[in-house]
Image (spheres, grey):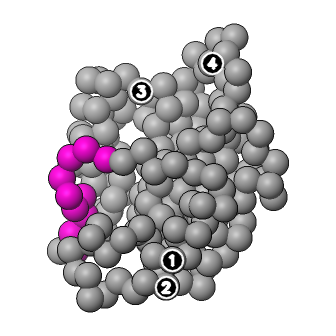
């Protein structure tokens, strides 16, 4: 991102100069082959302008609805990546690196709305999407497996955790765990 993009006074998310700097610094340090951004808070032609300046040869995005949702994925030409399915809450791609067997990657932004998130559990399905082979899902599911994963346990219901846990089981997924801060997001 050689150029920072600004668009008026109401900049948010990826359009913020500070966010531009963080992404530029991360790209310089880590040089990722694939980059996924969730809930960018930018849409339309302004989002296209930002995507073009990210420094990747390829990109695709699922449009945000207002300031909610939105998924952007970027990748270098050093890999063969084919986006096989787009959905308001996820992108699914088939990735092939060199002569290795292909694998699937889903980048997910689960809606905070329980009804829409239930649709995610139905639509992001290994059989329905014909996912054959390894599958890695990177995400903000807006759901947790246990109440221990949230700061405010009183606001998390077992039903919400149960739907997510059932989905993980049905998809034969394995939670790979996480190292770092206990909570990675706070309001305000």
> For the residue labelled by badge 4, is the local secondary structure a helix, a strand or a loop?
loop
> For the residue labelled by badge 2, is the local secondary structure a helix, a strand or a loop?
helix
Give the spatial CA distance, label 4 vs label 2: 39 Å
Residue 95 picture quarter: top right
What residue does disc 4 label? 97
Q: Main secondary structure of the magenta part?
A: loop
Q: Position of residue 135 (x, y in %)?
A: 62, 41
Give the spatial CA distance, label 1 vs label 2: 5 Å
Which one is earlier in the sequence, the residue at label 1 or at label 3?
A: 3
> For the residue labelled by badge 3, is the local secondary structure a helix, a strand or a loop?
loop
Q: Is residue 5 above or below residue 142?
A: above
Residue 139 in magenta stretch: no
Quadrant into which the C terminus falls: bottom left
Q: Position of residue 137 (x, y in %)?
A: 54, 48
Residue 170 picture quarter: bottom right
Give the spatial CA distance, label 3 vs label 2: 37 Å
What residue does disc 1 label? 162
Q: Is residue 104 among the parts visible in the rendering?
A: yes
Q: Which mark is residue 32?
A: 3
- Residue at coordinates 53% horizontally, 83% vertically from top-left? 114
- Residue at coordinates 58% horizontally, 16% vertically from top-left? 78
Q: Residues within 10 Å of mark 4 (few under 14, many from 20)?
A: few
Give the spatial CA distance, label 1 vs label 3: 34 Å
> For the residue labelled by badge 1, is the local secondary structure a helix, a strand or a loop?
helix
Q: Residues within 10 Å of mark 2 (few under 14, many from 20)?
A: few
Q: Nearer the viewer, mark 3 or mark 2?
A: 2
Q: Nearer the viewer, mark 3 or mark 4?
A: 4
Contact, mark 4 vs mark 2 (Cβ under 8 Å): no
In this rendered view, identify the residue nearer to me: 53 or 133.
Answer: 133
Q: Residues within 10 Å of mark 1 (few under 14, many from 20)?
A: some
Magenta stretch, residue numbers? 178-187
Q: Which mark is residue 159?
A: 2
């Amino acid at each position: 991102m050689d150029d920072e993009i600004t668009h008026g006074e109401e900049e948010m998310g990826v359009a913020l100069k500070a966010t531009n700097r963080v992404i530029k610094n991360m790209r310089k340090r880590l040089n990722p082959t694939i980059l996924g951004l969730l809930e960018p808070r930018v849409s339309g032609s302004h989002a296209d302008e930002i995507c073009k300046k990210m420094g990747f040869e390829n990109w695709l995005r699922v449009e945000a609805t207002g300031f909610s949702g939105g998924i952007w994925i970027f990748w270098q030409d050093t890999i063969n990546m084919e986006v096989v399915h787009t959905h308001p809450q996820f992108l699914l791609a088939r990735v092939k690196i060199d002569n290795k067997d292909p694998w699937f990657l889903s980048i997910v932004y689960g809606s905070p709305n329980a009804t829409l998130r239930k649709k995610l559990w139905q639509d992001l399905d290994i059989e329905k999407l014909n996912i054959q082979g390894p599958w890695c899902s990177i995400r903000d599911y807006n759901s947790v497996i246990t109440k221990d994963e949230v700061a405010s346990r009183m606001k998390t219901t077992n039903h919400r955790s149960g739907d997510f846990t059932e989905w993980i089981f049905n998809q034969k997924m394995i939670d790979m765990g996480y190292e770092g801060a206990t909570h990675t997001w706070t309001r305000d």
